[in-house]
Amino acid sequence: MTAPTSAPPAPSGPLLLDMQHIQKAFAGVTALDNASLGVAAGEVHALIGQNGAGKSTMIKVLTGAYRRDGGSITFAGQPVDFASPLAAQRGGIATIYQEVNLVPLRTVAENIFLGREPRKWGLIQWPAMNAEAARLLTELGIQLDVKEPLGSFSTAIQQMVALARAVSINARLVIMDEPTSSLNEREVETLFGVIRGLKARGVSVIFVSHRLDELYAVCDRITVMRDGRTVYAGDMQGISRLQLVEQMLGREIKNAGAQTGFVKHKGSAGAKPLLGVGGVVRGTRLQGASVEVGEGEVVGLAGLLGSGRSELARVIFGADQPDAGELRFGGQPVQFRSPSDAIKAGLGFCSEDRKAEGIVPELSVRENLTLALLPRLSRAGVVDNRQQAEIVERFVASLGIKTSNPDQPIRELSGGNQQKVLLARWLAMNPKLLILDEPTRGIDVGAKAEIQRLIGELAQEGLGVLMISSELEELIEGCQHVTVLHDGKTVANLAGDEISEAQLLHAMAQGLEPEDMPRPPTPPQVRA
Amino acid sequence: MSGEINTAARPARSGSGGQGLLADLKQVLPSILILLALLIFNAFFTPYFLSVQTLNVNLTQVATIIIVAMGMTLVIATGGVDLSVGSLMAISGVLAPLIFLNPAFASLQGLGIALAFVVPVLVAGAFGVLNGLFVTRLKLQPIVATLVLYIAGRGIAQVITNGQLQSFTTPAFTYIGLGRPFGVPFQVILMLIIVALTYWVVKRTVFGRYVLAVGGNETAAGLSGVPVSRVKLAVYAISGLLAGIAGLIVIAINSSSDANQVGQGMELDAIAAVAVGGTLLSGGRAQVLGTLFGALIIQLIRFTLLAKGVPDAAALVVKAAIIVIAVALQQRRRRE
Ligand SMILES: Nc1ncnc2c1ncn2[C@@H]1O[C@H](COP(=O)(O)OP(=O)(O)OP(=O)(O)O)[C@@H](O)[C@H]1O
Ligand SMILES: [Mg+2]
């Protein structure tokens, strides 16, 4: 490696933020070890590293969510030591945390203005607040009823709401910890527009992402972390994609061909039908959605925000009941009345919202990993500890889950490692059909290729996979078929060579005017 | 800017949910320390504290609280709470004498006694199921759902007996409150068995994991195939059953049953024991051993204050203060 590992080139402007020699340990386990991060005024700074490298911890140390064990932080020329994220916000740092930490039961508008509601004589100015919230979101190309509770919207919308909140705080530094993990290209473009706007105003941005292409698109400089240390800092254009990955992983890599780890097999033309879904209607969100998955097939489910992908997945899995439509599984018409019915039939569903619908935070990695498997791991209701430990050990090793021990509460794991545990929860079930909603969300490049390869292999052994992904490469390289939804309706079925970026984008955007983003302010409508 | 305001640097527990008994004891360390402090204090300042008799007095008094608090621990672990336990104790307590004093069983005393043990407990359990149905079917908040029987339950008990006090001397029945096999009060043995059983259920069974999963993240649990409603129904039923048993013990100790008195204030003692023991009231964790120590702490405080002649009203304030301190200590340990 020729890339410098110390004495990074000086940034162009004076430093707005300078973190030096940061130390942080949790219960004796070192998370940050002499880490540093310098961000110049008005620059967009990428912060990258493998899952568990310490990126989120670095951010939380800065904003006062965690207290550092050592090191110094200088912000805007002053040594600072924020006591809490609120103090950091008052000090001029707006943060979008990796796990959206807004209040699901409050309305979208309330969430955007939480803690700084426009008031008159002590009373919240509801109409003004709602109007301003709607305006902010319209600028981001989103139209929805800001009086609806935030929790009723998808993760992607919630990320955009968090973004609206962050930009509306007049901050000097905006931190985004994996803001794009559930956004598709279009929304990512909007986000980039926002970032460039911030930059033009002289605001600095720290941008954490596992999607490397995005970094080159918007970032000026980059800091790479590995195992709690800062291993590289320099200009974004001064390092190639390959070098960057090598810095992250700390070893040289050879194959740099495909973007993903999928090895697509041809998928025999007459795959035995496994799942058949026809004309599903539910409320306003699903208006005649259909999809077919054969044994051994990986089928993609594509669509824009609010196209009904996750809703369809929930209906198939029995988590929601459809108003109309038919479901066949393994040749039989079925209607799962609950997820446990679906699981018994051999389905698995890895939700996109790992905080709300995935992890049980207080329980250990071991219990989380085997939660769905427990009935099979027990005799007469008593858990077989040995068998459980074996399975956990196997998956921790095969997916490379970074945990101090299987007894560690899952909430202490980094975001990407939590995601791996949830994937393992379903892989361990050995299902016939696996529904994956953004399966590689927040997972680093190295592990992502591994997981994609694993999915491909399992499919070759007969597993049917229905994969929702907002990453086009994942769909293009991994799927034999792609079903495209728009406004809750199936609008296209692509197969083979038809699965290309152009075709997908075209199908996904059906019915939308080319110039409708950002849209002119119109009466809000729910589209989530 | 002061860096001490947040406790972020405090090392987080490692290895929580560990398999070993030792790991579990470590988790409830604050309550163990408080208990030890109280014991040492009394050993020095309370005359005759270190005697078998004092020990027995305290254990007999605390046994019912612990039994009820075991059910409460499970309910709270699912994110619920059961306010009806005291009233269910009263129902069970008035039913038992009605059965074994009933002339119908005059010639069949054995059967009468047997039924007097079984029926009231089952009835209390059935009311527990009703609590569970309120929570799962009607989707009532647990605090509201169980408030119904908290109020109505004692009324039912009074109606059953017309508000009359029932006294009795039936050794075969009062054995569960007054019996001393090997010199150990019978209810203490029963209590220890129930504690051990609850601990085992939480640690080793699928049901135990389900309880924690439901309390920790109900949505995630449901999507992983956990039968959320059945788990909730079960914990309220268990809480009812245990309250039923406690009701029988209380009337056996007193050799009389008073619908107004049996189980009075029990719900608060049980909840306090759970809280002092380090179980989160928001659900997702169950410190069975913590609850045991929590109840012992509360009992010992009551005993100490009594022994020191502190007036009742003042005693309540001290008791409250110590509960607050204990809970605060547990909370501090949790924050990272
Ligand atoms: N509260 C905590 N208690 C114990 N360990 C923690 C805690 N928070 C983070 N860690 C550990 O610190 C390390 C760094 O985690 P961090 O969340 O900063 O990773 P990250 O770089 O953001 O990863 P990802 O890409 O997966 O989000 C991990 O090994 C994690 O397990
Ligand atoms: Mg992170």
Image: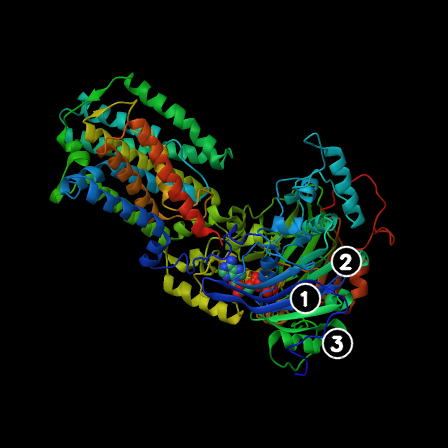
Give the residue type at disc 3. Gly
Q: CA distance from mark 2 to mark 3?
A: 21 Å
Q: CA distance from mark 1 to mark 2?
A: 18 Å
Q: Where A367 sits versus A326, above or below? A: below
Q: Residue at x 30, y 29 (%)?
A: B263
Q: In the depicted view, which residue is nearer to us: A377 or A211?
A: A211
Give the residue type at disc 2. Ile
Of pointers 3 and 1, the one earlier in the residue sequence: 1
From the viewer's perspective, is the residue at label 3 or at label 1 nearer? 1
Which quarter of the figure has residue A245?
Answer: bottom right
Question: Could you classify mark 3 by the number of other residues whose Cα lies within 10 Å: few (under 14), some (14-19), or many (20 or more)?
Answer: few
- The answer as to whether the residues below labels 3 and 1 share one chain is yes
Residue A50 at what x, y percent from top left? 60, 69
Q: Residue at x 65, y 72 (%)?
A: A261
From the viewer's perspective, is the residue at label 1 or at label 2 nearer? 1
Label at residue A195: 2
Could you tell me which secondary element the residue under label 1 belongs to? strand
Name the image quarter holding the N terminus of chain A.
Answer: bottom right
Q: In the depicted view, which residue is nearer to us: A338 or A52?
A: A52
Q: In the depicted view, which residue is nearer to us: A153 or B233?
A: A153
Residue A430 at what x, y percent from top left? 51, 63
Q: Where A526 sits versus A61, above or below? A: above
Give the residue type at disc 1. Gly
Of pointers 2 and 3, the one earlier in the residue sequence: 2
